[in-house]
Image (cartoon, rainbow, N blue to C red):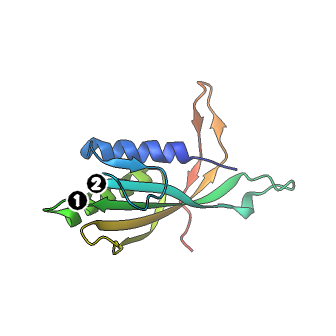
Amino acid sequence: MIDIENKVLNTVFDAVRADFPTASCYGEYVLVPSAFPCICIYESDSETYTYSNDEQLHEHQARLTYECNVYSDDADDKKEQAKAIADIVDRAMQSMLFVRTFRSQIPNQDRTIYRVTLRWQAVVGEPITESDGNITYQMYRDRVR
């Protein structure tokens, strides 16, 4: 199974914390964030890209879907803050060749919190170990279905 979760989380968290150093960042869905602003990003789907399976059904590529919820409770500008963070996350994901498939303001149960939800997809190749020991992945922009 192809797993790039650490690469995705590190890329997104570094990008967000560059502009919002106190942001809470989670690599899983959090029902009630304990601090704001907050982002929760996680892999919501991983499916074998069947066109790349070999005869032994070895997975050479996978279509991955990531979802992110951005929360803000800023008393003066929660909508603008959430949208600004969502833009940062979107740029970070697109820098890894993910294609955004969804972005919407989602009503939160607690109306004092503004929430934006985003989703992306990419086709990711199996890991390649470089001569220096670093692991890289081939990333492909997939056509959105």
Q: Nearer the viewer, residue 27 or 10?
A: 27
Locate residue 125, reporting x and y percent.
64, 50
Left or right relative to 19: residue 142: right
Query: Mark number for residue 37?
Result: 2
Among all residues in the image, which is located at the extreme right? 55
Residue indicated by mark 1: 81
Secondary structure state at the residue bearing disc 1 = helix
Query: Mark number for residue 60?
Result: none
Q: Earlier in the sequence, mark 2 or mark 1?
A: 2
Locate residue 95, reporting x and y percent.
42, 50
Quarter of the figure with residue 38: bottom left
Secondary structure state at the residue bearing disc 2 = loop
* Quarter placement of the C terminus: bottom right
Residue type at numbered disc 2: Pro
Q: Nearer the viewer, residue 124 or 19?
A: 19
Quarter of the figure with residue 132: top right
Which residue appears at 57% of the width and 46% of the height?
4
